[in-house]
């Protein structure tokens, strides 16, 4: 980069120093380097490889083991969470519907239908129970593949009363310790969802997942994926293991099960966790950690564990075991691969003179195109020509295909957001709390409008509408977070910090008002479809960053501020149903950036689903 800048210096600048000219002359073509310099490097490397090959093979293999174990751990955790998280989500949603009165818990017929449907939607669960404040219960279980109503626990049972008392003290859904269920003749985990209305406890919902189902999954994972996994409870006890079916686990009705200790299963690998063997020499990651809680090794096995929080009062640990014989074979294969690679390198040196010039030209083309691609200047990326050499031809095709894919991908991601994230890549993946201004827009009576239009007309209308509004938002440095039906969600103040994010949002809103009103006038003259818009804006603290699952992330914002902004847009619909474009903002936005804008107070309004009220202002048209 420095030499490139020197070539572009104007004539009046100081001449290039002699030392720099000497370095320029010392640079040689790739063809000459391949024949001469690369030959010397390879010959020198042969001796080094012979001396350190065993050490490198061991370390590389352990690194490979660490990476494979990390992949296995992620797969194991994903599958386990895939078993339990849907139960938690459905249970929490069902509890919320009872709290909100959407489901009448006293209506036996309705509750029967709802709970049967919920259990049918949770194949991971074996049963579901609802108990009201008077300890009346409604229980359904999955027996012989059918969902049937079962007798609930007796109201005078101490363990049952203790569980209800515990639920009364909790405010959020939680997983219990493993308990014994005589109806199912096995131990199980229970998701408990306290149900309150106006702060008063009215009941509790429980969903049941048996430990045998987790053990069956581990057995299936070992048979299909060749991954031997297990789950520990409180570092000492076995919660799930392929060999646990041979151990009788019992307990008192509704009380915590006495789980078997690690040494109870006939698995010599698990005894390493009891102090046998030694610490495994797992290479650390760049952050200095191995990524595992325990890593133990013996002459026959390696065992690794990792914490998996979120499921009960005591911590869970997931673990994997490997045979050390697998490591030895990996080292042998690595050494063989190194020898073959050396031979290939020697042959490459002999043929390098024939391909050097072609390589140079093709690499320069790829480098130039990649530099354009790095800056996301996709319209200026030239097509890399084909090559007679297969690898370069494949690289050219792959690169050209990647450019085509990125051009398509560019239509789904804001280019400005991607460039901002690239400029702060060290912080781009971290979520952080920050004060932002959030905007929601919505088309008035869109459902009624769409009912009279064909699908392609609706798509054309929305595309034109989104182009109009997104242009106003992006002109003020805003980020369009997402399109939700006919709604736009946007924010100001991230990823780059903006001291005037509230003022920018208000200027964008004013521009939207002008654009929408002008567009409605045009459509009236031309006989087109008129689109009226409602806009809500709020300023406040949010969490902003990459949010989502391990397989898919979105750079977005979450928090109460987002909900209030959405409520402002809904309030605009209710308070001004007939106007062409209405912008409502909160007092926080007015205070942060409302100076110089035409604002009129509308009063104080309650916010649905939230305690307290919000002072609301309207941004008057043709102001700002």
Image: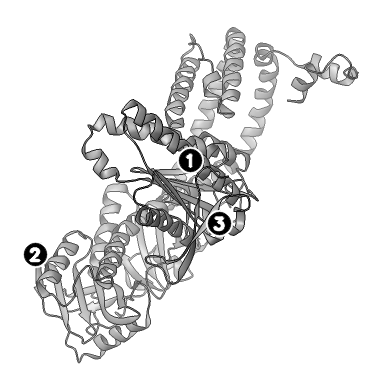
Q: Nearer the viewer, mark 1 or mark 2?
A: 1
Mark 2 and mark 3: Cα distance apart in space: 59 Å
Which residue is more in the foreground, 224 or 418? Answer: 418
Q: Which residue is drawn at the image coordinates 21% and 39% (left, top)?
A: 451
Residue 541 in the image: x percent, y percent? 55, 60
Few, some or many residues within 10 Å of mark 1 (<14, 14–19, 20+)? many
Q: What's the mark number on residue 144?
A: 2
User: For residue 73, what is the image quadrant?
Assistant: bottom left
Tell me the residue that label 3 is attached to: 589
**Label 2 secondary element:** loop
Q: Position of residue 308 (x, y in %)?
A: 42, 63
Q: Is residue 282 visible?
A: no
Residue 128 in the image: state x and y as whole percent: 20, 71
Is the C-beta separation of discs 1 and 2 under 8 Å? Answer: no
Q: Which residue is mark 1?
A: 512
Q: CA distance from mark 1 to mark 3?
A: 17 Å
Looking at the picture, the colour scheme in use is one colour
Q: Is residue 238 visible?
A: yes
Specify which label sits upstream in the sequence, 1 or 2. 2
The residue carrying pointer 3 sits among few (fewer than 14), some (14 to 19) or many (20 or more) residues within 10 Å by Cα, namely: many
**Quadrant location of the N terminus in the rendered image:** top right
Front in this rendered view, residue 2 or 249: 2
Q: Residues within 10 Å of mark 2 (few under 14, many from 20)?
A: few
Where in the figure is residue 387, as x and y percent of width and height? Answer: 49, 10
Q: Is residue 173 left or right of residue 143?
A: right
On the image, which quarter does residue 377 sit in?
A: top right
Q: In this rendering, is residue 19 above or below 185?
A: above
Residue drawn at the location 43% of the way across and 31% of the way down: 411
Q: CA distance from mark 1 to mark 2?
A: 60 Å
């Amino acid at each position: 980069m420095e030499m490139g800048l020197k070539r572009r210096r104007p004539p009046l600048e100081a001449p290039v120093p002699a030392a720099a000219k000497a370095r320029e002359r010392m640079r040689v073509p790739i063809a000459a380097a391949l024949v001469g310099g690369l030959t010397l490097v390879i010959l020198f490397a042969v001796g080094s490889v012979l001396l350190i090959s065993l050490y490198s093979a061991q370390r590389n293999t352990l690194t490979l083991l660490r990476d494979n174990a990390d992949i296995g751990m992620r797969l194991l955790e994903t599958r386990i969470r895939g078993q339990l998280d849907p139960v938690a989500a459905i249970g929490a949603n069902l509890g919320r519907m009872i709290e909100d009165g959407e489901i009448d818990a006293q209506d036996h017929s309705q509750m029967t239908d709802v709970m049967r449907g919920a259990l049918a939607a949770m194949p991971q669960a074996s049963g579901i129970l609802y108990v009201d404040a008077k300890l009346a219960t409604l229980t359904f279980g999955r027996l012989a593949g059918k969902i049937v109503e079962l007798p609930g626990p007796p109201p005078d049972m101490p363990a049952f009363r203790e569980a209800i008392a515990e639920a009364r003290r909790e405010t959020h859904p939680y997983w219990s310790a493993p308990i014994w269920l005589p109806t199912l003749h096995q131990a199980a985990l229970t998701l408990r969802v306290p149900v309150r209305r106006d702060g008063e406890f009215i009941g509790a919902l429980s969903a049941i997942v048996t430990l045998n189902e987790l053990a069956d999954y581990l057995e299936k994972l070992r048979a299909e994926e060749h991954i031997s996994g297990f789950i520990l409870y409180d570092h000492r006890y076995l919660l799930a293991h392929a060999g646990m079916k041979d151990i009788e686990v019992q307990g008192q009705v509704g009380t915590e099960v006495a789980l078997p200790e690690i040494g109870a299963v006939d698995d010599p690998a698990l005894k390493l966790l009891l102090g046998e063997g030694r610490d495994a020499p797992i290479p650390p990651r760049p952050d200095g950690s191995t990524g595992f809680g325990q890593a133990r090794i013996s002459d026959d096995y390696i065992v690794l564990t990792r914490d998996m929080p979120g499921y009960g009062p005591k911590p869970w640990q997931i673990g994997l075991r490997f045979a050390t014989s697998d490591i030895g074979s990996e080292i042998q294969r690595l050494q063989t691969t190194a020898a073959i690679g050396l031979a290939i390198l020697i042959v490459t040196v002999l043929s390098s003179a024939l391909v050097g010039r072609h390589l140079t030209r093709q690499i320069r083309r790829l480098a130039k195109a990649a530099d354009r691609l790095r800056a996301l200047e996709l319209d200026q990326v030239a097509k890399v020509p084909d090559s007679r050499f297969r690898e370069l031809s494949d690289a050219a095709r792959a690169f050209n295909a990647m450019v085509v894919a990125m051009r398509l991908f560019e239509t789904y991601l804001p280019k400005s957001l991607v460039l901002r994230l690239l400029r702060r890549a060290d912080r781009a993946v971290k979520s952080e709390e920050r004060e932002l201004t959030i905007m929601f827009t919505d088309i008035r009576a869109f459902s009624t409008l769409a009912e009279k239009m064909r699908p392609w007309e609706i798509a054309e209308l929305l595309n034109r509408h989104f182009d109009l509004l997104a242009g106003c938002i992006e002109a003020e440095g805003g980020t369009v977070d997402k399109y939700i039906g006919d709604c736009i969600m946007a924010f100001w103040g991230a990823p780059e910090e903006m001291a005037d994010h509230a003022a920018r949002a208000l200027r964008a809103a004013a521009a939207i008002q002008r654009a929408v009103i002008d567009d409605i006038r045009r459509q009236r003259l031309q006989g087109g479809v008129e689109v009226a818009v409602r806009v809500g804006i709020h300023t406040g603290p949010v969490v902003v960053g990459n949010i989502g699952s391990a397989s898919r992330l979105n750079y977005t914002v979450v928090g109460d501020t987002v909900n209030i902004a959405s409520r402002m847009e809904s309030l605009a619909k209710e308070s001004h149903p007939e106007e062409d474009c209405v912008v409502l903002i909160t007092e926080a936005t007015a205070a942060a950036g409302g100076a110089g804008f035409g604002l009129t107070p509308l009063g104080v309004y309650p916010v649905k689903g939230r305690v307290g009220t919000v002072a609301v202002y309207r941004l008057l048209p043709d102001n700002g």
